[in-house]
């Protein structure tokens, strides 16, 4: 009972704060308000250590969505993690995770951003290794060490910001844009954002983080950890628009989007398909940011958070019922056994594809039309945008096919059902938001319609790409279980695509194993080698030798001393003779 009460108290507290935060965001947006709140922590003579918070419509709205999803995830966990003896510890870790995200959202200061940034990294490590086994440990190490690169970039940025005499970057963005020497800040911030949002070549940790419990995945991969990098770049967007780094980010994020979409079409692990889907959408957000549309990227960030959290909740319900099996080939015809969960899954899938009038449609369709209207985009990026959209629809239809209409491949004795009322209620809250959230946000953030003028073939290109992608996804998946899977005819290409272009291998062997083994060799040869030989160990050996000689002298008679005395006199006399 105590565990249940902790879940319910956390749920109602977060939900009430979320609703209040949403009301404030509407107020701040309507009146165009920005508030800075400063707290003097320590003041010594003329030195002040000040904690600064930034409150505007963007921070309030993002906080509202993060808290809403967190509250529903905690409520969902009440049943999902019911058999865990340490559920209170789990809830506290999730609350600490949410607090770190709040610190990141409301900070206009690089120091306080680092508090939230590092808090997210540390707590995510604790949550990824929550199930204590070797796979979780390896995934946790990959996650933590990949994100350390971004943490170091933020630390270097903090050091470089001393050139301005303050860490409140919010005041200096326009000046930084015109200051060529401060381009280093832009590079460091982009590097930090690329690690946290898992862009190439740091992509491998995001599917590996699926080792965490499913409610954690619903929170981490929708609105918190992976979106931290996108949110940071939204704040720093002024710096890299119309610059070389902007073009570089556009290319990298486009390739990430393409790689993740291709990999998801060859993956059979349910949670990894959804994780690769998250990676693809993060690439889309980064791409539109690089083109100079921060509000549009923020809009897609919010709509994506709604249906992605719902996707993970549905996946958790399915995995629970499938006796912890995550292979989609074992999930045929679930619609007849678990109608509510599969209906929610397909609504979230359709929102992800950009089905008209669901949450994803309002942001994705607008993004693709703005890309079509942009004169500065090249053909490679244009191709990556639209082809990746087609891949998204393909793997979504493939997933829907395996869950809806494929043959039943589970065991003959199964107990599939939608019996959990608590999990149903948690999913219902996000189901409503996945349907109406896009239109609500669209009317709120864009109160006046924008004129988008496109020729006929470009206007219908999005629809054509989506329909083609869905049809191909169905064709590739529609294979009887007794026949050879079509993708196995192209085994090397299939293996290369599903392994994310060999990135996990490169990350573990190249990025993590090589520096750690090099560090081990340096420690052994220098710290424990030469420095010991010429330092502490050799000095101790000399002292031992001298003290042994001294002991021998003390233990002998006077004759020994006389002999030594005579020897020294003869030695000194000979030396004097040679010198003279």
Image (spheres, helix red, strand yellow):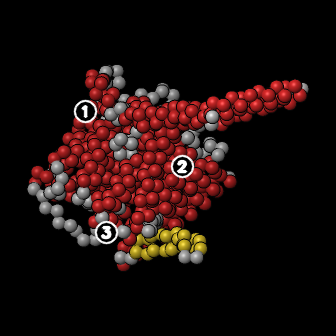
Q: Quadrant of residue 493?
A: top left
Give the quadrant of the C terminus.
Answer: top right
Residue 122 image label: 2
Q: Quadrant of residue 367?
A: bottom left
Q: Residue at x 12, y 58 (%)?
A: 454
Q: Residue at x 46, y 51 (%)?
A: 151
Within 10 Å of disc 3 (Cα), the crowding (few <14, some 14-19, many 20+) is few
Residue 475 image label: 1
For this rendering, which residue is in front, 59 or 19? Answer: 59
Q: Residue at x 27, y 35 (%)?
A: 474
Whole-number angstrom distance, CA of label 1 to CA of label 2: 43 Å
Point out the residue furthest to the bottom here: 31
Q: Are marks 1 and 2 in contact (CB under 8 Å)?
A: no
- Tell me residue 510's x, y (percent): 41, 34
> Where is 230 relative to 478, above or below?
below
> Where is 557 relative to 418, above or below?
above
For marks 1 and 2 on the same chain, the one whose residue lies earlier in the sequence: 2
Q: Secondary structure at mark 3?
A: helix
- Tell me residue 442's x, y (percent): 30, 64
Point out the residue furthest to the front here: 580
For this rendering, which residue is in front, 266 or 474? Answer: 266
Q: Quadrant of residue 500?
A: top left
- Front: mark 3 or 1: 3
Q: Is residue 430 visible?
A: no
Q: Is residue 145 visible?
A: yes
- Tell me residue 416's x, y (percent): 49, 37
> Where is 547 relative to 309, above or below?
above
Within 10 Å of disc 1 (Cα), the crowding (few <14, some 14-19, many 20+) is some
Tag 3 residue: 174
Whole-number angstrom distance, CA of label 3 to CA of label 2: 33 Å
- Tell me residue 179's x, y (percent): 30, 64
């Amino acid at each position: 009972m105590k565990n249940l009460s902790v879940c319910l108290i956390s749920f109602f507290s977060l939900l009430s704060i979320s609703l209040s935060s949403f009301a404030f965001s509407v107020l701040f947006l309507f009146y165009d308000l920005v508030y800075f709140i400063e707290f003097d922590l320590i003041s010594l003579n003329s030195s002040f250590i000040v904690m600064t918070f930034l409150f505007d419509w963007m921070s309030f709205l993002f906080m509202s969505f993060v808290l809403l999803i967190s509250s529903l995830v905690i409520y969902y966990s009440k049943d999902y993690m019911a058999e865990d003896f340490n559920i209170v510890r789990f809830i506290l870790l999730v609350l600490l995770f949410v607090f770190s995200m709040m610190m990141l959202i409301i900070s206009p200061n690089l120091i306080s951003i680092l508090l939230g940034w590092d808090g997210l990294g540390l707590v995510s490590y604790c949550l990824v290794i929550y199930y204590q086994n070797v796979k979780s440990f390896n995934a946790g190490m990959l996650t933590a060490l990949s994100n350390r690169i971004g943490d170091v970039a933020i630390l270097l940025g903090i050091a470089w910001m001393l050139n301005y005499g303050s860490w409140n970057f919010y005041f200096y963005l326009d000046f930084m844009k015109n200051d060529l020497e401060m381009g280093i800040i832009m590079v460091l911030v982009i590097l930090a954002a690329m690690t946290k949002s898992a862009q190439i070549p740091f992509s491998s940790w995001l599917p590996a983080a699926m080792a965490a419990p499913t409610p954690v995945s619903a929170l981490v991969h929708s609105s918190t950890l992976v979106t931290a990098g996108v949110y940071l770049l939204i704040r720093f967007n002024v710096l890299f628009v119309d610059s070389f780094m902007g073009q570089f980010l556009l290319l990298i994020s486009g390739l990430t989007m393409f790689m993740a979409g291709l990999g998801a079409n060859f993956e059979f692990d349910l949670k990894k398909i959804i994780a690769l889907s998250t990676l693809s959408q993060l690439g889309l957000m980064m791409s539109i940011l690089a083109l100079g549309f921060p509000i549009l990227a923020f809009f897609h960030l919010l709509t994506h958070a709604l249906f992605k959290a719902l996707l993970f909740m549905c996946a958790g319900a399915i995995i629970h019922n499938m006796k912890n099996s995550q292979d989609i080939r074992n999930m045929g015809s679930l619609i007849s056994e678990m109608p509510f969960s599969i209906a929610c899954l397909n609504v979230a899938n359709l929102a992800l594809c950009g089905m008209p009038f669901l949450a994803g449609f309002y942001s994705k369709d607008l993004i693709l039309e703005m890309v079509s209207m942009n004169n500065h985009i090249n053909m490679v990026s244009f191709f990556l945008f639209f082809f990746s959209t087609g891949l998204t629809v393909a793997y979504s239809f493939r997933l829907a096919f395996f869950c809806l209409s494929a043959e039943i491949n589970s065991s003959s004795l199964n107990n599939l059902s939608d019996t959990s009322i608590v999990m149903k209620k948690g999913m219902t809250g996000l189901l409503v938001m996945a349907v109406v959230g896009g239109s609500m946000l669209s009317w709120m953030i864009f109160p006046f319609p924008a004129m988008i003028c496109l020729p006929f073939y470009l206007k219908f290109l999005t629809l054509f790409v989506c329909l083609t992608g869905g049809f191909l996804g169905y064709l590739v998946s529609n294979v009887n279980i007794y026949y050879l899977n079509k993708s196995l005819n192209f085994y090397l290409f299939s293996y290369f695509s599903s392994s994310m272009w060999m990135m996990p291998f490169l990350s573990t062997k190249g990025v993590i194993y090589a520096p750690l083994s090099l560090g081990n060799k340096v420690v052994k040869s220098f710290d424990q080698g030469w420095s010991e030989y010429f330092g502490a160990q050799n000095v101790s050996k000399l002292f031992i030798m001298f003290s042994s000689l001294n002991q021998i002298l003390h233990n002998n008679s006077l004759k020994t001393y006389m002999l030594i005395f005579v020897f020294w006199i003869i030695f000194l006399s000979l030396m004097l003779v040679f010198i003279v």
